[in-house]
Amino acid sequence: MALNVFWTMANHILKTNCFVLLVFATTTVSLAQDRAANSDDVATIDGLINAYYESVSGHPGKRDGERMLSLFVEGGKIRIDLTGGKPTHELAEEYLRTERFLTISEDFFEREIARDTQKFRDMANVISTYGISDAVENTNYTARGVTVFQLVRHTGRWWIVSTMYQRESEEFPLPAELLD
């Protein structure tokens, strides 16, 4: 039942945002063409999602905010909801330059566990299940959750238009279908 509600919501998000994505892609993405990115990071959906997880992960110190920022269209959005409370919405340009994103105080590795991609022409909706641990190889996750990516392909590359993520909780465990 919960999975049906989730997929219905995801399908609704994809359908209702297709028009917005197309308008957004033709206006905003053209403004972000100067944003340099590693071509391997943005040539494919796989490359883009892998670069996202690599950018958010790392050892204590600084994260690569510029690499992460190069994945987003100008004006791209990040919606954060870790607790199921009131989510925050921030522009990628603002959030990815804050100390709370840039500075890691301990080993933090977020890796993809499973993915479902819905793609039509130059747009895609990706539902990515992730796990968080203190080492790259460690699959004993301290937290898990789902990130939804809205993507658009423009100027020969893929861009993140928005991300939205929520962590798993005791009240809302991840259904088996999101772990395949």
Image (tube, rainbow, N blue to C red):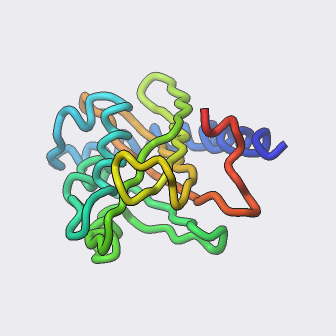
In the rendered image, the quadrant that contains the N terminus is: top right
The residue closer to the viewer here, 124 or 84, is: 84
Query: Residue at 30% across / 64% down in the picture?
Result: 93
Query: Residue at 45% across / 22% down in the picture?
Result: 121
Does 44 appear above or below 21? above
The image shows residue 38 at horizontal and vertical percentages of: 16, 40
Query: Residue at 51% across / 62% down in the picture?
Result: 79
Q: Is residue 112 visible?
A: yes
In the rendered image, the quadrant that contains the C terminus is: top right
Does 55 appear above or below 129? below
The image shows residue 33 at horizontal and vertical percentages of: 20, 44
Residue 165 quadrant: bottom right
The image shows residue 106 at horizontal and vertical percentages of: 32, 70
Q: Is residue 102 left or right of residue 132?
A: left
Query: Residue at 41% across / 53% down in the picture?
Result: 110
The residue closer to the viewer here, 60 or 166, is: 60
Q: Can residue 28 be seen in this view?
A: no
The image shows residue 73 at horizontal and vertical percentages of: 32, 49
